[in-house]
Image (cartoon, rainbow, N blue to C red):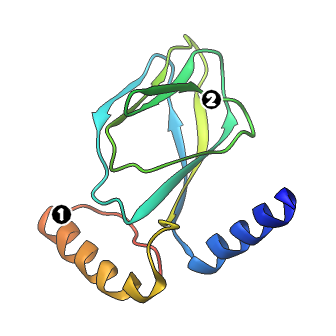
Amino acid sequence: AAFLQSLLAAADIAERGIGECTFSALGPGAHLHPHCGATNARLTAHLPLIVPEGCSIRVGEEVRSYREGELLVFDDSWEHEVWNRHSTDHRVVLLIRFWHIDLPRKEYKETQRAMKRYLARHRRATTIPPL
């Protein structure tokens, strides 16, 4: 039953579409300082591909260590930051952004327009999930 529910949830997310899918590399000793995404209408997933010791992420009050192949999904409108405390190796994750699972499909179009207006005002280059 749990597997079927996971499969149905994955299919629903896939139907919603991916707005951005990119590789994110963080060099040895690097720290992405606390920041927030532009909206809670989307979720962000990190799929760790190359993870040396000492790589972690904080979202809100929660800190987690990255583990290769272990997907992390979070609302990036919450303050978050990332560290690579390793001295020689890069951390590489596949970063995926998609519509928030609680956003009704009938609100996609208006939410997409609002996000485009906001991003244009703030001159941010990012991809919005498709309709």
Tell me where residue 88 sits by quadrant.
top right
Is 29 located above or below residue 10 in the figure? above
Q: For this view, does 40 lie left or right of residue 75?
A: left
Q: Is 91 rendered above or below residue 84?
A: below
Expressed as whole percent of the image width and height from the top left, the position of residue 75 reads 43, 51
Q: Secondary structure at mark 1?
A: loop
Q: Nearer the viewer, mark 2 or mark 1?
A: 2
Q: Position of residue 99 (x, y in %)?
A: 48, 69
Q: Please state which of residues 25 and 19 is positioned toward the viewer in this rendering.
A: 19
- Identify the residue position indicated by label 1 in the image: 123
Which residue is under mark 2?
A: 66
The residue positioned 18% from the left and 63% from the top of the image is 123
Q: Residues within 10 Å of mark 1 (few under 14, many from 20)?
A: few
Above or below, comparing residue 101 to residue 36 in the picture: below
Can residue 98 be seen at all in this image of the molecule?
yes
Q: Is residue 57 left or right of residue 38?
A: right
Q: Is residue 131 visible?
A: no
Q: Amino acid at mark 1?
A: Arg
| 3D distance between C-alphas at marks 2 and 1 | 31 Å
